[in-house]
Amino acid sequence: MSEPTAVSQPAQEFEKVLSDSSRQLASFDTDDKTAIQKLQHFLHSHPAGVPLIVLLLSIIIFGSILGTKFFSAFSLTLILQQVAITGIVGAAQTLVILTAGIDLSVGAIMVLSSVVMGQFVFRLGMPVEIAILCGFGVGALCGFVNGWLVARMKLPPFIVTLGMWQIVLASNFLYSANETIRAQDISTTAPLLQIFGANIRIGNAVFTYGVIAMVLLSIGLWYVLNKTAWGRHVYAVGDDPDAAELAGVNVKKMLMSVYVLSGLICALAGWALIGRIGSVSPTAGQFANIESITAVVIGGISLFGGRGSIMGMLFGALIVGVFQLGLRLIGTDPQWTYLLIGVLIIAAVAIDQWIRKVAG
Amino acid sequence: MASEPILTARGIVKRYGRVTALDNADFDLHKGEILAVIGDNGAGKSSLIKAISGAIRPDEGEIRLDGEVVNFRSPIEARKAGIETVYQNLALSPALSIADNMFLGREIRKSGPLGKVFRMLDHAAMEKIARDKLSELGLMTIQNINQAVETLSGGQRQGVAVARAAAFGSKLIILDEPTAALGVKESRRVLELILDVRSRGLPIVLISHNMPHVFEVADRIHIHRLGKRLCVINPKDYTMSDAVAFMTGAKTPPPEAMAA
């Protein structure tokens, strides 16, 4: 780093001494950090670290208690199948929460999309491919309404999506007339609807297409969030929308695109849901919104926006899955699962606050 | 400096409810000059600057850039027209890295199919440019260009914001209190940078309360008072106490300065 020559003739009297000033670069004390501080810095730059550690620990603990009953390819892939829907919805939730919003309507959008995909085939006699596209269209439309109300009308995301949750869920019951389409009917007329229930077996390991979709979606979104301008803008908007606007990000357009994409991902989850349960049921997936928020929070994504990794959400969903299966195999009252998940949620937010202090 | 103006504003009015922040304010920036804008707190300096940089839309009045009437609806449009601004709050995203912040809203994509189809960012190129720009400033004792901005000190953050504006401004650069958070040595570097930017032909608008800095680098000084331009003075003809007297209303400026 060369010193500019102008320093030799400073304009202000008190600046004359500057030419004698130390040329040494500021040195940062990197050695005498305690192990805890190092951990804090590591976690600050790797937000998916905590959930990954918790996930591995919980697998090891349940594995050592239950032995091969838990620690088998079949059981471990069963966990993946059980969290597939939560994971896909959680991906949509992650996008919204990264922009410092929250989406309570994800579960309702998912169910409405699946009902549209089913009923358009069975009631309107549409070709299944077109019906699926219509399902995605409905998901995108719901996301668009959310986005428009949040970005243009400046309403708080919590209120907008609380309202949309009720509106979409009610539309779902009104349109479907509370009718379930039976699994046998679907597999004879429109097997494409159940595609995500099909699976690939490798030994005892069972990977449904739904699981593969969840993993590919997470990897795809990880790429988009970290390697493209759009992804960097999602973080910037969640971090400080005013600063992002001044720095040249079109905040409104960004929010619209996030909510529409979230709606599309919910529609994908709706399709995967048909594969998971076999039938099209307007009462399925009642708790998808709460489960997705749980996965996001345990995954170390900050509810205040701008921080966290989508991989953390995936690990968070898997942690819940591991606890549910592990405790069921041990044979405890299922309420213990909910109690422990509650503890995990609070602990995750506490750790998030602690990691933020690294910036001091 | 009787050169042609690059940016002019005439009769700018901005009201916030019943408060009139700008009351028929005028503004002229000439090519290749450093124009300082000074004024008391609440005189309307910030509103004037925001109107030029697109952060607010004036209720009335006309702004011309290079003779063409411009009507910025957002800072993005002003930036596209070549006006870069360093805001007092710096407009940095704390959780993003230094390189990400410098290129926010104008990221460089990789060439070839990776960039076109997969929209992949060229992090290596952006980091290199960011590093070069920061070393040019000489402000940086930053070791890691990928560290989050929130882990930097106040002065380092200011350096990042100034470097971003200097790197991308093509018509003019607006600096709102660029030395307010800096130490003596860092302030000196920023002032040198300002002179360096002018020597490249870019005009600069400098808002500052630091009179020694203003009198040292400015070619002309725009004194703002009660929502309008009171006068424009040449720092060689007046002392700092004259300027302070004009801006606080203790003295009335001479008519030839008022006409300017």
Image (cartoon, grey):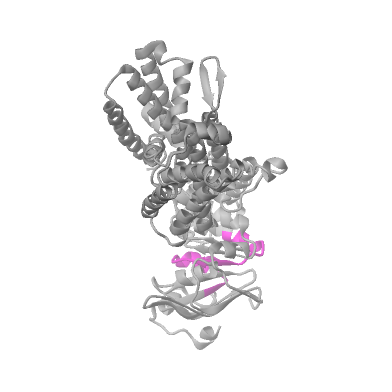
Which residue is at a point 39% across and 24% down the rendered structure image? A322
Left of B107 or right of it: where is B245?
left
Q: Nearer the viewer, residue B135 or B115?
A: B115
Residue B202 magenta-highlighted: yes
Residue at left offset 35%, top offset 35%:
A348
- Is residue B219 in view? yes
Q: Is residue A308 above or below residue B205?
A: above
In the rendered image, residue A205, in percent from the top left (x then y), is placed at 51, 18
Magenta stretch, residue numbers = B194-221
Farthest residue, direction right? B112
In the rendered image, the quadrant that contains the C terminus of chain A is top left
In-image side of B246 versus B192 (left or right) = left
Residue A201 placement, left or right of A352? right
Residue A105 pos. (x, y %): 41, 47
- Marker count (numbered): 0
Q: Is residue A17 visible?
A: no
Query: Which quarter of the rendered picture does the N terminus of chain A lie within?
Result: top right
Residue A37 drawn at (x, y percent): 38, 31
Task: Specify the farthest residue to the top.
Answer: A68
Q: Is residue A288 left or right of residue B77?
A: left
* Residue located at (42% from left, 51% from top): A171
* The stretch drawn in magenta includes residue A167: no
Q: Compare residues A212 and A232 and report the one nearer the observer.
A: A212
From the top left corner, tell me how far across and down residue A258 is, in percent: 51, 49
User: Which residue is at a point 39% across and 70% down the rendered structure image?
Assistant: B41
Looking at the picture, tell me which residue is in the foreground, A278 or B111.
Answer: A278
